[in-house]
Amino acid sequence: MKQRILIPLSAAVLTIGVFLACKKDTSDTGTASAAISSLNCASATFSAAATINVAYNATASVPYTGGNGVAYSAGTAITSTGVTGLTATLTSGTLTNSTGNLVYTITGTPASSGTAAFAISFGGQSCSLSLIVNAAGSTSATVTALNCSSAVLSSTATINTAYTGTASVPYTGGNGVSYTAGTAITSTGVTGLTATLVAGTLASGAGNITYNISGTPTTAGTAAFAITFGGQTCSFSLTVSSTTASCSSLSGVAKVVCLANTFLATLSTSQQSTVVLTLNLTNAKRWSNLPCALSCRNGLLFSSLSSTQQAAALALIQAASGTGTGEGYDEFNMIRSADDYLGQTASGYSSGNYVIAFLGTPSTTGKWMLQFGGHHYAQNITYDAGVVTSITPLHEAVEPKGSFTYNGTTYAGPMATEQSVMADMLASFSSTELASAKLSTTFSDCLMIPGSTTNTFPTTKQGIKVSTLSTAAQAKVLAAMAPWVNDLDAASAASFMTIYQNELANTYVSYSGNSSGTPGSASTFLNANTDYVRIDGPSVWIEFICQNGVVLSGIHYHTVMRDHNRDYIGL
C-alpha cells in the first residue's frame, strides 16, 4: 500500500498534489522511472554452469532492494570482460515495491576459463556481475568467497550437554560443480565438537554450504571451526552457554529481555548487526503503513529468518504483546495473515515482509525500543530500566475488514473490536452531543499519518469534551481506548489505562462523515468511506477511519494511536 499525504477535503481548501493512500505515488510531470536503493551482484545466481569453448545460454538473477514498483524494458547487450565471448542482456519486467531480482540473459561462447565480468547499471545503482567459467572437464568445486561471519547456526549449545546442529555458510562465485562430504573438523577454543561438510552441488553464483555439528562441549564460550572449501578459508563460531537458557520462569520486561537475547543467539553476526541499531529519533521514526518491506523499516525481514529464528522472534513478540482473543499477539498474526490473503491477488503483500528490530541493546537496566510490524501493523515499545515507558506510535489496519479464509483457516475480522467500540461510543452520544462533536472537515486518512516524520498534533482540541458527556457515554469513551492499549502486555496496559482514565475528563472526542449515524444505533456508524472518529486527550490520541479498499472492493480500516507526551520518549 503506497502512502498518501493526508489533506482534509474541506471545500475551503484547494487540494494540490493529492496522494491517495495505498496508491502508487505519481507526478504530473510524467511516468516515474524504475529505481532501486541497492543492487547485489555478489549474491547473484546463474541458471547453469559455464565451460570454456562451450556455447552458453542461461540466466542470471541479481537481487535488489528498495524497488519502486515501476515497469522497465529490456536492456542492451553488455559485453563480458576478463573471459570474453559472452553478453548479458536485461530482461524486461516490473519492480516490486521492496526486494526482488533482475534477470539477465547470458549468451555466447566463453573464450577461456576464469571469470567473465559484466558491468551492469540499473535504477541508479551499479555493480559487477561475475560468472565463473570452468576449464574443460573440470570436476573441482570452487568458490570466489566464503562468508563465515554470516554463517547461520541452527541453535546455541550448552556446556556438558550433547549437541547436534547445523551451520549454513554463505559463499559467492560457485562454479556449479558437485562435491562430496568432508572429514570432521575439530573445534578450537571450546573443545569437544566437530563440524563435517555435507555433500552437495554448488550453485552457479551465490549459495550456502552446510556443516553438521555434533559432540559435547566441555566449557562455555566460543567453539571455532576453521574450514577450507573450494580454494577459500574462514572460521565460523558456535556460542556455548554456561547454563540452559530458559525464559519460561520469568515475567514482564525480564521475560521480554530474556527472549530478545534468546532470539539474538540464533542469529549470525551480520544478522545481529542488522537487527540491533542505534536508539535515536531517525531510526525510531522508520515505520510505515506501506508494503515497502525494509526500504521504509528497520531490522530483519521474517522471510530472511530460518524456522528456528522466526520461532524465537515470534516468542519475543508474543511476550511483549497482549494475550486477549483478537488483541495483541492474536491480532498481529491475523493482520499478517490478511497480508498473505492479499498477496494471492496483488504483489508485494506477505507476512514474510514483516520485520523485527531493536533500537539499543535489550536490557532490564538500560533504555531500548522493540519495533515489529509491516504493511498494516507497526508497534514501537520503549523500555527503560525494566519498565515500559512508551507504547506509541502504534499503527493497525486491515484489508479485508471482515472475515477471510487463507490456507484453510478462517479468520474473523481482525479489527472488528476496534470498529465496534468506536461505533458504540458514538452511538452513546445524544443528538446534541453528536452535533457538538462533529467536524466540518472530511478526512481521507488518519491525521497523524503512519510513518510520517513531519506531522504534528493540532494545537487546539476539537469536538466535545468528555467531562460534558453523560456518565454512560464517558465510560464508552474509556472503553473505546482499550483495544489499542490492550495490544500490550497486561501489566503495561493497565498502567497506561490508568493514565488515560485519570485524564478522561479533559479528553475530547470528534468525528467526521458518518452521515447515517443515529444516536442509540451503533450499526449506523463507521461503515462508509471517509467515516472518521478521533479521541484526543492530554496524552492519548487515537484515530479510526474507513477507506475504500485498495486490493479488494469494499471498505477497509486504518487506525493510529499516538501519545502527546510519550511518542519517541526522550529522543
Image: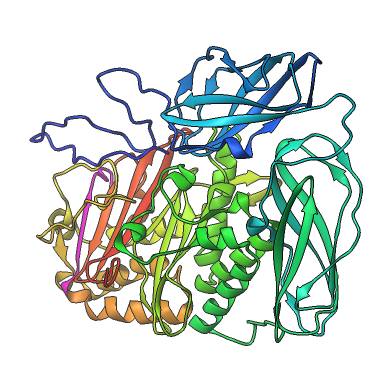
Quadrant location of residue 501? bottom left
Residue appearing at x 80%, y 15% in the figure: 53
| Residue 231 within the magenta-colored segment of the rendering | no
**Percent of width and height locating residue 314:** 60, 64
Residue appearing at x 20%, y 41% in the figure: 442
Quadrant location of residue 395? bottom left
Residue appearing at x 53%, y 70% in the figure: 324
Of 325 and 38, nearer the camera is 38
Query: Does 10 sit left or right of 406 as displayed?
Result: left
**Percent of width and height locating residue 534:** 25, 57
Residue appearing at x 63%, y 59% in the figure: 149
**Percent of width and height locating residue 415:** 46, 55
**Percent of width and height locating residue 518:** 27, 51
**442 shown above or below 72:** below
Q: Tell me the colour scheme of the image.
A: rainbow
**115 shown above or below 414:** above
- What is the span of residues highlighted in magenta in the rendered image? 506-516
| Residue 512 within the magenta-colored segment of the rendering | yes
Location of the N terminus by quadrant is top left
Residue 136 visible? The answer is yes
**514 shown above or below 113:** below
**441 shown above or below 466:** above
Of 83 and 120, nearer the camera is 83
Of 541 and 27, nearer the camera is 27
Location of the C terminus by quadrant is bottom left
Residue 525 visible? The answer is no
What is the number of callouts on the image?
0
Query: Does 120 sit left or right of 144 as displayed?
Result: left
Query: Does 275 sit left or right of 187 as displayed?
Result: left
